[in-house]
Amino acid sequence: KQEVTQIPAALSVPEGENLVLNCSFTDSAIYNLQWFRQDPGKGLTSLLLIQSSQREQTSGRLNASLDKSSGRSTLYIAASQPGDSATYLCAPSGAGSYQLTFGKGTKLSVIP
Amino acid sequence: DTAVSQTPKYLVTQMGNDKSIKCEQNLGHDTMYWYKQDSKKFLKIMFSYNNKELIINETVPNRFSPKSPDKAHLNLHINSLELGDSAVYFCASSPGGFGRGRDEQFFGPGTRLTVL
């Protein structure tokens, strides 16, 4: 059974800082891994999808890396902005049902 | 031009009632999902559905049943509601069928269910 851990649970940084969010998973037999953001009271917005054969994926100020063999992924946010404040969720897609397993998220606060 | 939509956004009901939540996607996707986010914000898969093939998470009570009138819709029916069913329910979709595990999933805005 896949288990996903995200560290830290919460993070507060001043505007402009670069930051890294960590995700680890126990079963390395994944097809892909998605990073989402969730704003309070809202749905999930897909940020990046990394295929199991890829090591990195970039979108704007976001860069996600994947080390499948060690069961780790990181989300790097450059030059953070107050609008980046949200909960960030990591979700690998497993074999069999291709369903996502979610971590509990990292709640990010970017202070102006 | 909402991609994945859910109705209602809020649902308040009494214990023991039967209720439904509707989900529609206009992305032309082949696979749809239902997820539950509990009070601790933990998000868990409930169902995956593709072309009449249903995969059920083993922890989901049989009071919950997904129904798909067509490829663009996957509704969630809940019988005999219990207090513990209170949560936010999210619908999602992805382009490919089962076996296309590389696909990105897109989520709806969620339905907040409160059982009194």
Image (spheres, grey):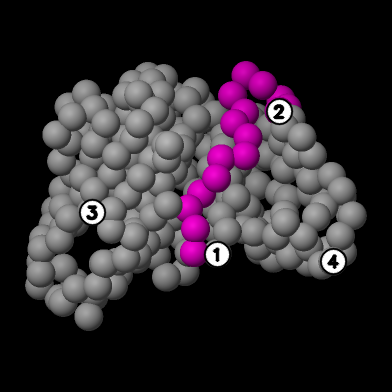
Seen from the viewer's position, the closer of residues B102 and A61 is A61
Q: Kindly identify the amino acid type of the residue bearing the numbered disc 4.
A: Pro
Give how far apart the Cα atoms at labels 4 and 3 are.
Answer: 39 Å
Q: Position of residue B55 (x, y in %)?
A: 25, 36
Q: Give the mark toward the camera: 3 or 2.
A: 3
Which portion, as a residue range, is magenta?
A41-57
Q: Left or right? Give the position of A1 relative to B30.
A: right
Residue displayed at 59% across by 24% down: A51
Q: Left or right? Give the position of B8 relative to A46.
A: left
As for residue B71 lying within the magenta part, the answer is: no
Residue that label 1 marks: A40
Mark 3 secondary-structure assignment:
strand
Q: Kindly identify the amino acid type of the residue bearing the numbered disc 1.
A: Pro
- Residue B21 shows which numbered tag? 3
**In this rendering, does residue B45 appear at all?**
no
Mark 2 secondary-structure assignment:
strand
- Circles 2 and 4 on the same subunit: yes
Chain letter of the residue carrying label 2: A
**Sequence order check, earlier mark of 1 and 2:** 1
Q: Residues within 10 Å of mark 1 (few under 14, many from 20)?
A: few
- Residue A112 shows which numbered tag? 4
Disc 4 to disc 3: CB gap under 8 Å: no
Which quadrant would residue B13 be assigned to in this image? bottom left
Q: Residues within 10 Å of mark 4 (few under 14, many from 20)?
A: few
